[in-house]
Image (cartoon, rainbow, N blue to C red):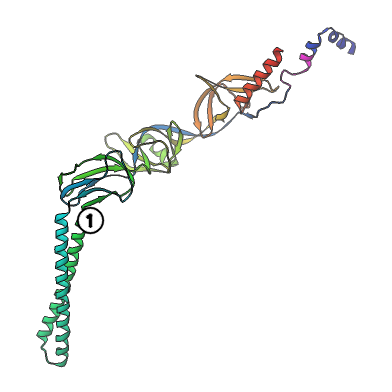
């Protein structure tokens, strides 16, 4: 039996014997591999959303007067507390001086009334003054005290009117609209300047009522942008539906940071509505060439082949495979190293 086996082998060329004995890829693979398997992944519902600023307001006049100076214009950045509009304050300063004079008079009369009360009280206790005189002195003192309180309040009001002539920014932000020009006369309540803050943003979405229950159960959402996915810090669902569209307004608070998002932009929002089993692989294992997406599959004999796959959604640093792979197959985790390895093997075989 051994003679029969050895006799055909002696007739084969040496190269044929080597190909028969050694596997095609006998070298140790210079890259890592991973086994494809199904894993639990969230089920998402994609909806359209709009970015808006949390802090946005229109500053209005709280006193009347003529615009003396406008410090900022559209697209200017304003620090918190910075003056943005100044009014002429001739009338307000005059009213303040008048209120201060009235307060000084009231304080002087209060002092006089207190002294008169102390004098009458002493006479009343010694029996030299009547009860009527005592009551009149007491009433005069109380009236003087009330006049001081009223005068002090009037002065505070006048002082506040003076402060209203210099309008300050309530928070840091960008000027979006300028409503007045220098020289205009404005009244109380007239808009002066509009602005918004880019430091805190949120996304608003109209959620169909069919998905409201699932969204309430999970309260997790991601804002999908060209730079990736941003998880919302907080998901707030309004407690009523819009009667015309039968949708619930949802507000998603964005974390602090620079995401290249601006108020008014259109974004996609992925709401988590459940879970399912999906075929997931590391996103770094995908090789993207033009319109073709593939992976390097490694078989049981460590032979490497490029295979085209169809990719679904992204789940963090993993991608869903819709077609082209089966659970249990092994793929290269570094497609660049796998491509270099294949090219080197091909050149070695040609030699």
Mark 1 is surrounded, within 10 Å at the Cα level, by few (under 14), some (14 to 19) or many (20 or more) other residues, namely some
Q: In this view, does 159 lie above or below 20?
A: below
| Quadrant housing residue 134 | bottom left
User: Which residue is rendered at x = 21% and y = 62% of the image?
Assistant: 156
Residue 74 visible in the displayed image: yes
User: Which residue is rendered at x = 40% and y = 35% of the image?
Assistant: 260
| Closer to the camera in the image, 135 or 157 | 157
For mark 1, what is the residue?
Answer: 163
Q: Residue furthest top?
A: 11
| Closer to the camera in the image, 124 or 307 | 124
In the picture, measured across the screen, residue 103 lies left or right of residue 232, that is left
What's the magenta region?
Answer: 18-26
Q: Position of residue 344 (x, y in %)?
A: 67, 19
Q: Position of residue 318 (x, y in %)?
A: 54, 32
| Quadrant housing residue 296 | top right
Total numbered labels placed on residues in the image: 1
| Dot 1: element | helix
In the picture, measured across the screen, residue 332 lies left or right of residue 226, that is right
Q: Is residue 53 above or below residue 285?
A: below
Q: In which quarter of the image is the C terminus?
A: top right
Is residue 266 a member of the stretch shown in magenta? no
In the picture, measured across the screen, residue 88 lies left or right of residue 45, that is left
| Closer to the camera in the image, 140 or 266 | 140
Q: In this view, does 171 lie above or below 299?
A: below
Q: Where is residue 324 in the image (x, y as percent from the top left)?
A: 56, 21
User: Which residue is rendered at x = 14% and y = 79% of the image?
Assistant: 113
| Quadrant housing residue 211 | top left
Q: In which quarter of the image is the N terminus?
A: top right
Residue 280 visible in the displayed image: no
């Amino acid at each position: 039996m051994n003679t029969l086996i050895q006799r055909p082998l002696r007739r084969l060329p040496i190269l044929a014997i080597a190909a028969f004995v050694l596997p095609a890829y006998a070298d140790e693979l210079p890259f890592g591999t991973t086994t494809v398997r199904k894993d639990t992944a969230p089920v998402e519902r994609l909806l359209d959303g709009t970015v808006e600023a949390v802090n946005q307001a229109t500053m209005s006049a709280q006193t009347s007067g003529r615009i003396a100076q406008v410090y900022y214009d559209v697209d200017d950045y304003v620090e918190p507390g910075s003056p943005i509009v100044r009014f002429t304050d001739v009338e307000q300063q005059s009213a303040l001086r008048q209120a201060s004079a009235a307060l000084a008079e009231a304080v002087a009369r209060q002092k006089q009334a207190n002294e008169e009360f102390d004098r009458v009280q002493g006479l009343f206790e010694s029996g030299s003054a009547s009860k009527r005189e005592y009551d009149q002195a007491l009433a005069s003192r109380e009236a003087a005290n009330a006049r001081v309180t009223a005068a002090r309040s009037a002065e505070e009001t006048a002082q506040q009117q003076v402060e209203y002539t210099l309008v300050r920014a309530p928070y840091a932000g960008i000027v979006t609209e300028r409503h007045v020009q220098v020289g205009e006369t404005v009244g109380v309540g007239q808009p002066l300047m509009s602005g918004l803050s880019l430091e805190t943003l949120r996304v608003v979405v109209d959620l169909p009522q069919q998905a409201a229950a699932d969204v309430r159960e999970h309260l997790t959402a991601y804002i999908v942008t060209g730079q990736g996915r941003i998880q919302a810090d907080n998901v707030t669902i309004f407690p009523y539906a819009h009667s015309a569209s039968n949708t619930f307004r949802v507000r998603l608070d964005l974390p602090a940071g620079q995401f290249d998002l601006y108020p008014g932009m259109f974004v996609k929002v992925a709401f988590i509505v459940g879970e399912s089993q999906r075929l997931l692989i590391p996103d770094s294992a995908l090789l993207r060439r033009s319109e073709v997406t593939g992976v390097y599959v490694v078989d049981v004999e460590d032979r490497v082949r490029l295979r085209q796959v169809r990719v679904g959604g992204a789940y963090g640093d993993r991608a869903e495979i819709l077609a082209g792979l089966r659970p249990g197959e092994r793929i290269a985790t570094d497609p660049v190293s796998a491509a270099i390895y294949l090219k080197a093997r091909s050149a070695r075989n040609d030699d």
